[in-house]
Image (cartoon, grey):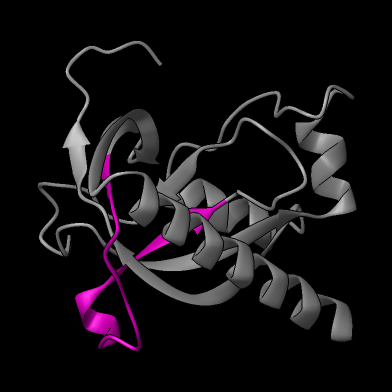
Amino acid sequence: MRAPIIATSLATAILLLFAAQLAAAAPATRVANAIWAHDSIYDTVATDTTFMSPPLHSTDVIYSFMMSGLMGQRSVAEYAPGDREYNGGRWNVQVVVYTPAGLEEFDDGSGFVTYELTNAEAVEEAADQGLLTIRPANFYFECPLIPNRGHNR
């Protein structure tokens, strides 16, 4: 049971480091083709805004694959602009890691995903099938989703 706790702690530390790097790099940077939601790819503006212990109803889940074990899977958001529940890009990060069965399913040996999950329901279904584990990172940040107007994926 210690391995998941250590992995989650490590992932949280890396996310905090990533946020610190964003803050040092630039106050706001547009990132194209960054986040999936409802089978559509969105751009975002990476900001240096993080916060502690927000009311959960004021954030949306974002699944981060940064420490997943494979490259190429972009983050997946629970809600997007136009959804009544969308909170404007205030995120509650959930760390996603591929299980051994998930590595068999999503990796052809290259270390990159063979296909991306493009909506929250697909992420949750893959977890239900034992292909992924999902753990809270206890990390909250803000970056809005911007509709992708025909940019390449």
Looking at the picture, does residue 53 appear above or below residue 21? below
Q: Quadrant of residue 30?
A: top left
Question: Which quarter shows the C terminus?
Answer: top left
Q: Residue at x 57, y 31 (%)?
A: 116
Decide if residue 152 is on the left or right side of residue 117.
left
Q: Nearer the viewer, residue 101 or 11?
A: 11
Q: Position of residue 94 (x, y in %)?
A: 52, 66
Q: Quadrant of residue 112?
A: top right
Looking at the picture, does residue 83 appear above or below residue 135? above
Q: Is residue 63 magenta?
A: yes
Q: Position of residue 126 (x, y in %)?
A: 65, 51
Question: Which quarter shows the N terminus?
Answer: bottom right
Query: Which residues are drawn in magenta?
Result: 45-64
Q: Residue at x 89, y 51 (%)?
A: 100
Is residue 1 visible to us here?
no
Decide if residue 71 is on the left or right side of residue 2.
left
Q: Nearer the viewer, residue 122 or 27?
A: 27
Q: Nearer the viewer, residue 12 or 57?
A: 12
